[in-house]
Image: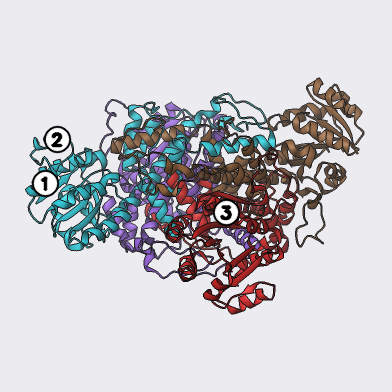
Chain colours: A red, B brown, C cyan, D purple
């Protein structure tokens, strides 16, 4: 079928490529004429303006927005004058599901259908397919099914879950209508919240492995520092790339994130090209807010988020207050860095 | 080659089966004559006593212990009179690596070699193979390589990690000598620590999804309870089995634990056969102790452990003290269960 | 000066009492005529309706609302027809500061001044005075200073903070204009967030003390349970009431919450009258949301909140999923309660 | 009575001063002759060697060790040849209670009594008195009661806990025999664990207050960063010294640590003399190990400990692995510091 794509960054462009390869027609627009030209070379239909974009699309139009979460509302406002009742607007970015609920309501008043799609797969999606979590009206989502079917990974050679034989539905293909508007991004939000937690679990564990030789290092003994009681228990120089690799084979913690960790570690076991300033991009935060609204404990997901904050120096003032208190009650002077 | 196996529980028996299928000779012993008889039917060589077990094995003997961590020392003590210098004793259970260090030292004084093997794979190991993390003398581990090669999953159809082409070693086969004695169980310990964290990440996230319909439920408004500000944001009845399934396909959080979650959820979406009393079996605790000795932050792994403690009611006294304090300063009366 | 008080629950009534004792005139209203009558006996001026309440007050009226957070907006709506430009409306309850910002803006359009007051002190405020955190226009807050001065504890016999001699301001009296509208409840919100964290620290520590005799109890040894390695290290039957008491004298962790814990523990060392279902009343949740918006790590405050959720059974589904995963990968059966 | 003191650092010297002022006779020894001379000026009896120290003391000797935890065993070994059956050895430092249990057993075999004293109060103890948690034989502790009575703060003007009137015991004086050997340091250990948690609660809350003006700062909008949704909610420039001060008066979170925070903040609101590298000195770590052995959840106390680790850069490797994973799955490049 035909799909219009606005936003030809890494994600949007690759989605167009996968759709074109799947024999869909893609009409594409981006603020960058260069980005449009690039995809026209790969059989997409380019548009030089939103007006041209809208004219080129058959009605009812199906338009997929793939732009940063912060500019979705502006993009919709720009596009809206060119749309008509019955058209479908799909937000495939990282929107907050609360915005989906609002947008769907606003667009419904103009008889435009809104679909929110949470997309996972990152730079690997072109090759592996995108896992998509969809929110919207059942009929509209069904109408778009050919698009989702092409973008998604499909069943591939992933073994069937026992008990799934008669379950039906699209989840085995790698896409799912999760519910009404917002449900797609809600599920994607939690997906990312989990992602933070899983990543942190590996990172903490790997850090424990890396420090397993701490007993080989000289220690100081003063009132400020506890000497390691049993240095003979921490004499291991462990090979992290090999350990990540062996865990990929038959261990309980085999996962795609472990695959990626193994790849990163074999390339550079010390990870020296990274400074350890870890970004977070919204979904992790929103997951915690949802957990709190729901009254659901989320210890692990919260810690994973806060560790990212801390990695960027955001614990700085709190830490200084701790040092200040220690100075006040015990006269403890901060030890200088490196000691 | 030949291997003696002591302890024919679920794990030990399946290992014997996999070894026999791989054309190794297995001499087996268990306190339960029935367990021995069962494996004799499957081509293992049975022994009615430790003495017979030792006599039957060719020298140098290679003996694999697969017994609960709490009885390893006793098992070694029972076996020791039947062993001779040059023999090899392998502990494949869930020992604390600190015990490995001690045992290796004690056995070395009798010229008996000790090998510690952390084994992951659970009930699936018979079919998938066991991921093994090994600690011990390099020569001895190399001598046992045929055993590890058969027990491990091998390369299978798991894609090669980019950059691994020239790396060599055994990790791609699913087993690895991690270092000297204790290193095997140390790495297995951290593996389980990570396992707890990863499991908790999924569990918390799924719980957030499950409660996404909380806005549909009536709420009370009193000084003790905060009303949900935006009930319209929590109107989703999400299908957890479908969501677990869709995440298996192309999402960033695809993993074996997710596969298992999907299987559990399709069978019983409410998980009503479980009460939620989650056991922990040592490695998670030891991981935290190691992190603390090393001075490595382990927020996520600790929370995952504590959530298990809490699930078994171990936060009870602390919670009562919180209620008591609230009563003291604010006259707050506990709300009864169910409200 | 004169103040109108709406809402004569525990907090509102005691504030009136303290104000009357401080020679202020209080006009009081409550939905319960009984509550009004009670305070009329104690020299307050009663009003039978909002209309009478408004008529009784001199202009510009100063009206203090002391009602549950969930009904503040409705109370304002009811009162508004009776107010005039120049009047002052004070919300002394547990409002979300975000609502203060909105309300102040709405009321400003009618030339009514809004003041938000976060109040700490609970049932003890009548005797000790209330610690008040105030948000609002500087002139208006200054106008109300006599009220705050009476309600607050004053300097009392609390030693002066070194360095405070020339600092000026009202904070030493126990009340403070923190900033523009919302600032009062923002600071109170964080106060409560801290309160949760401090309470949890004591509760966890006390629980560790209580379990210090765990080595005296028989333990089971199976594959599901780690035996305690050193039972001889956990042989202490500690006297919690005495320990709480001794910490009140010269220890680093002396505090009012510790005083209250000591009082609760001496009355009932086992705290058997509490079930351990701990409520949370909004501020703790909002503190975490603010921390997340600000990108400030709040590990401790979040854990303290989640422990309360868990105490009410809200971790139940997550725990069941953990048990389900353990069953899937290891065939682990949940141990029954009490084992 | 008479007491020998070994170790005349800040803590030991001040204890001697307080004892001398309380009309006890103190015989003092330190490796530094200068430290001894200093106290001789203040009416202590100096000793130039351990032999002289032992000779000077009347029998049975009561010797208090006040040395760093790491050198206690060596100090005991040095002293032991000079002691005789019936003598009493008191460890007043920050020993691990597990060492107390061992030492008490060893010394008992020579008929020397061992007493462990956990001491809280820091540099303020000279003036305020020391809160002491004591472990040892009941008779021996009772014999030393005059020493504890002088060192402790006594009842002072701290209000009596309701219900304490008939309770008896010494806890109201600020010292307590908690149980047999090790119990003193066990309780002190948990005291410090709680201390970490309480400090962290204030630090996190203060950090949330400090960042309450984040909405006034320009934000970037890109795919890596979530824009602050409601900058108008974060427009507060809060005065932290004033807020700490106001909370000292009638709030629920009034405490000695808050008093100290107020003092630190009034002196330097930005705490710019501290770098935020927070030490931890053993007890916090041991508290978590005890919690884990006991199976008691200790979320808050653990987080507080890990925040200190992180403040010293110990999360570095884990953070780099997180960035590496993000790069692998999403091509995310780390944002440079300051952005």
Give the residue number, with chain letter if any, for mark 3: A141
**Spatial CA span between label 3 and label 1:** 56 Å
User: Is residue D332 rendered to the left or right of residue A20?
Assistant: left
Give the residue number, with chain letter if any, for mark 1: C51
Q: Residue at x 48, y 61 (%)?
A: A112
> Is A26 rendered above or below residue C27?
below
Kindly indicate whether the residues beneath marks 2 and 3 are on one polypeptide chain.
Answer: no
> Is B68 rendered above or below residue A222?
above
User: Is residue D120 rendered to the left or right of residue A158?
Assistant: left
Residue closest to the eye, A83 or C197:
A83
At mark 2, the secondary structure is helix
Q: The numbered mark 3 sits on a residue in which chain? A: A
Please state the horizontal and vertical placement of residue C150, each as a whole percent of the image.
Answer: 15, 49
Q: Nearer the viewer, mark 1 or mark 2?
A: 1
Quarter-wise, where is residue C88 in the image? bottom left
Q: Residue at x 58, y 69 (%)?
A: A57
Residue closest to the eye, A154 or A261:
A154
**Spatial CA span between label 1 and label 2:** 15 Å
Residues packed near mark 2 inside 10 Å, few (<14), some (14 to 19) or many (20 plus): few
Kindly indicate whether the residues beneath marks 3 and 1 are on one polypeptide chain.
Answer: no
User: Is residue B60 rendered to the left or right of residue A55?
Assistant: right
Q: The numbered mark 2 sits on a residue in which chain? A: C
Q: Nearer the viewer, mark 2 or mark 3?
A: 3
Please state the horizontal and vertical placement of residue B168, each as a whole percent of the image.
Answer: 82, 57
Give the residue number, with chain letter if any, for mark 2: C33
**Spatial CA span between label 2 and label 3:** 58 Å
Q: Nearer the viewer, mark 3 or mark 1?
A: 3
């Amino acid at each position: 079928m035909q799909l219009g794509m606005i936003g030809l960054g890494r994600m949007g462009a690759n989605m167009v490529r996968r759709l074109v390869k799947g024999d869909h027609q893609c009409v594409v627009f981006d603020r960058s004429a260069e980005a449009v030209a690039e995809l026209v070379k790969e059989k997409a239909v380019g548009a030089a303006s939103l007006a041209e974009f809208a004219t080129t699309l058959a009605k009812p139009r199906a338009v997929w927005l793939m732009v940063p979460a912060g500019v979705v509302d502006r993009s919709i406002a720009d596009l809206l004058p060119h749309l008509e009742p019955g058209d479908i607007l799909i937000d495939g970015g990282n929107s907050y599901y609360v915005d989906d609920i609002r947008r769907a309501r606003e667009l419904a008043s103009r008889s435009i259908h809104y679909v929110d799609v949470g997309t996972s797969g990152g730079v690997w999606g072109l090759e592996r397919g995108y896992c998509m979590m969809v929110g919207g009206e059942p009929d509209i989502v069904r109408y778009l099914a050919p698009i989702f079917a092409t973008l998604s990974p499909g069943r591939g050679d992933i073994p069937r879950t026992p008990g799934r034989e008669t379950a039906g539905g699209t989840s085995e293909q790698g896409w799912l209508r999760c519910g009404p508007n917002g449900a797609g991004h809600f599920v994607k939000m939690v997906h990312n919240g989990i992602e933070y937690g899983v990543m942190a679990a590996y990172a903490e564990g790997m850090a424990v492995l890396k420090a397993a030789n701490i007993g080989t290092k000289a220690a100081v003994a003063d009132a400020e520092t506890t000497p390691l009681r049993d240095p003979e228990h921490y004499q291991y120089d462990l090979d992290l790339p090999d350990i990540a690799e062996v865990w990929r084979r038959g261990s309980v913690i085999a996962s795609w994130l472990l695959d990626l960790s193994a790849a990163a570690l074999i390339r550079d076991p010390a990870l020296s090209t990274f400074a350890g300033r870890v970004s977070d991009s919204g979904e992790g935060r929103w997951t915690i807010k949802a957990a709190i609204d729901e009254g659901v404990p989320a210890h692990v997901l919260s810690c994973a988020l806060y560790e990212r904050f801390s990695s960027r120096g955001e614990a700085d003032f709190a830490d200084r207050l701790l040092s200040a208190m220690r100075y006040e009650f015990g006269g403890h002077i901060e030890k200088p860095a490196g000691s």
